[in-house]
Amino acid sequence: MDVRSRLTELGLRLPGVSPPKGVYTPAVRSGRYVQVSGQVPMAGGELVATGLVGAEVTAERARELSRQCGLAALAALDAVAGLDTLVRVVKVVGYVSSKEDFTGQAEVVDGASELFGAVLGDAGRHARSAVGTGVLPLGAPVEIEVLFEVAD
């Protein structure tokens, strides 16, 4: 699987890995797995959107931000293990900072899930959780964490 070529075909570019905003590392490899820390929508080290989904942020915009977080997760994976080692996406957990009556968390997290499917085909299919929450770090509307399997 040539992930870089597929990204190019889709007109996508990996962002730079954003420096941590706390005491953690963006990704950790343990054997055949890379756990990517929660990615919020950043550009140039700064958050690109804030607010609650269903209030200040539309569900469609949050879905786009979720996709952006998925690209950031691939960038973090690349920095730790290289995209050429990627075997599959194992699990995605999406957190959506939601207005109290917003119930479309799954559709928001679909942005990241669809990205992985488009880039990786069957290797992008994964287990997933989509969780609504009142607030996320830095006021982000969405946060995505990913567990990848990589080759030895």
Image (cartoon, grey):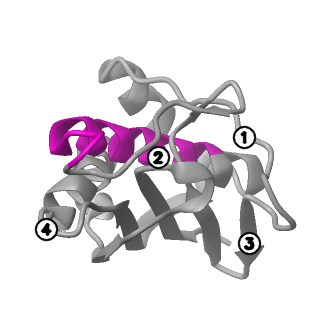
Mark closest to the chain's N terminus, 3 or 1: 1
Alpha carbon separation for disc pair 4 and 2: 24 Å
Residue underneath mark 1 = 18
What residue is rendered at 23% in x and 61% in y? 122
For label 4, count other residues whose C-alpha is less than 10 Å away and answer few (under 14), some (14-19) or many (20+): few
Alpha carbon separation for disc pair 3 and 2: 19 Å
What number is the disc on residue 69? 2
Eye-nearest disc, 3 or 1 = 1
Eye-nearest disc, 3 or 4 = 4
Mark closest to the chain's N terminus, 4 or 2: 2
Going by the numbered disc 3, the residue's amino acid type is Arg
For label 2, count other residues whose C-alpha is less than 10 Å away and answer few (under 14), some (14-19) or many (20+): many
Residue underneath mark 3 = 29
What residue is rendered at 41% in x and 23% in y? 12
Q: Where does the magenta region start and end?
A: 55-75
What number is the disc on residue 101? 4
